[in-house]
Image: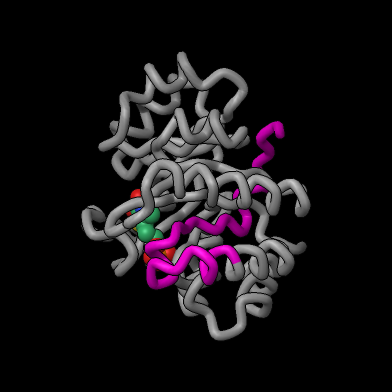
C-alpha cells in the first residue's frame, strides 16, 4: 500500500506488552480500534515483550489480515525481516535502531518512517527518502522505558516546520492535549495508551479523527 499523509491522522502503535502480555487481548483491542477508524497501525513488540520470533510472526500474520480487512497500512517497528515476512506496508526505524541508510537501501517496497526529535536529526531526514518522521516524546510517557525527555509543543512545532516530510507526534498524547498537539501542524497523532487503555476505544478513536475533519 502506498503511503499517504492522511494515514498518520490516528496512528495506533502497540504490541502484546501493551495489553498485559496477553496477545488475545491485544488482538481484540487492535481489531476494535480498526473497526473504529484508526488510520494506521504499527506492530511494536518491544521493551518487556515476551514473545518469541515465531510468536511475533504468527501474531503479525493475524495483524496483516486485520489491516487488509480494514484497508489500513500495517507498519512494523524496527524489524525489517519481520516486516518482509508478514508483508507489511511500512517499517518504522528509531535513532537507536538499525542505521537508516542501510534500512532504506534494503526496504524494497516498504515505506519507511523515522524517529527524529532534534533539529539535526530532521536536517538529516530531509535528505533521505523517508515517508514520514515521528517526533517525541512530546509529553512524559509510561509506555517506553528508554524514552528521551519530553520535548513539548513548541519544539514539536519547530520540528514540523523544519521537516520536508509529514511529521507524526508521539509520546504522552491524551484527550487533554490532543487538540493543542494537532494545532502545531503535526500531520497526525501516534498513540499507545490513549487508545489501548481507553475505557471506550471507539469513542476515543472518533474524537481523534474528528480533529482532522474540516
Ligand atoms: N516512541 P504513549 S514515545 C513508542 O518518543 C514510543 O519516540 C516514543 O506511548 C518516542 O502513547 C513512545 O502511551 C510511547 O505515551 C508512546
* Residue reaching furthest to the front: 54
Q: Where is residue 62 in the image (x, y as percent from the top left)?
A: 62, 51
Start-end of magenta stretch: 1-27
Q: Residue 22 in magenta?
A: yes
Above or below residue 75? Residue 123 is: above
Q: Which residue lies furthest to the bottom in this view?
A: 199
Expressed as whole percent of the image width and height from the top left, the position of residue 33 reads 64, 67
Quadrant of ligand 1: it is: bottom left
- Depth check, front residue: 78 or 49: 49
- Position of the C terminus, as image quadrant, is bottom right
Q: Which residue is drawn at 36% across and 28% down?
A: 123
**Is 104 colored magenta in this rendering?**
no
Left or right of residue 73, residue 82 in this image: left
The quadrant in which residue 49 appears is bottom left
Front in this rendered view, residue 98 or 175: 98
| Residue 153 seen | no
Residue 136 lies left or right of residue 87; in this view the side is left
Q: Which residue is drawn at 31% across and 24% down?
A: 99
Q: Where is residue 133 in the image (x, y as percent from the top left)?
A: 46, 39
User: How many numbered marks, from 0 up?
Assistant: 0
Compared with 16, 102 (above or below) is above
Which of the 4 quarters of the picture holds residue 27?
Answer: bottom right
Q: Is residue 5 visible?
A: yes
Residue 36's place in the image compared with 163, above or below, is below
Of residue 125 and residue 19, the one placed in the foreground of this image is: 19
Colouring style: one colour
Identify the image quadrant of the N terminus.
Answer: top right
> Residue drawn 30% across and 69% down?
142
Give the image location of residue 192, x and y in percent: 46, 64
Amino acid at each position: 500500500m502506498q503511503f499517504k499523509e492522511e494515514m498518520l491522522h490516528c496512528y495506533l502503535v502497540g504490541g502484546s506488552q501493551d495489553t498485559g502480555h496477553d496477545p488475545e487481548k491485544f488482538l481484540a483491542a487492535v481489531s476494535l480500534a480498526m473497526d473504529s477508524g484508526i488510520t494506521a497501525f504499527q506492530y511494536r513488540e518491544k521493551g518487556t515483550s515476551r514473545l518469541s520470533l515465531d510468536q511475533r510472526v504468527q501474531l503479525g500474520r493475524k495483524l496483516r489480515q486485520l489491516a487488509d480487512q480494514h484497508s489500513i497500512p500495517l507498519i512494523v517497528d524496527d524489524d525489517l525481516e519481520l516486516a518482509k515476512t508478514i508483508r507489511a506496508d511500512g517499517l518504522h526505524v528509531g535513532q537507536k535502531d538499525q542505521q537508516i541508510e542501510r534500512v532504506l537501501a534494503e526496504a524494497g517496497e516498504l515505506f519507511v518512517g523515522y524517529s527524529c526529535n532534534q533539529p539535526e536529526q530532521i536536517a538529516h531526514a530531509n535528505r533521505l527518502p523517508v515517508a514520514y518522521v515521528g517526533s517525541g516524546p512530546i509529553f512524559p510517557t509510561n509506555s517506553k522505558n528508554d524514552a528521551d525527555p519530553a520535548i513539548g509543543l513548541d519544539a514539536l512545532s519547530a520540528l514540523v516546520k523544519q521537516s520536508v516530510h509529514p511529521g507524526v507526534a508521539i509520546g504522552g498524547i491524551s484527550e487533554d492535549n490532543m487538540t493543542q498537539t494537532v494545532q502545531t501542524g503535526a500531520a497526525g497523532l501516534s498513540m499507545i495508551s490513549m487508545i489501548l487503555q481507553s475505557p471506550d476505544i471507539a469513542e476515543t478513536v472518533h474524537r481523534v479523527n474528528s480533529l482532522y475533519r474540516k
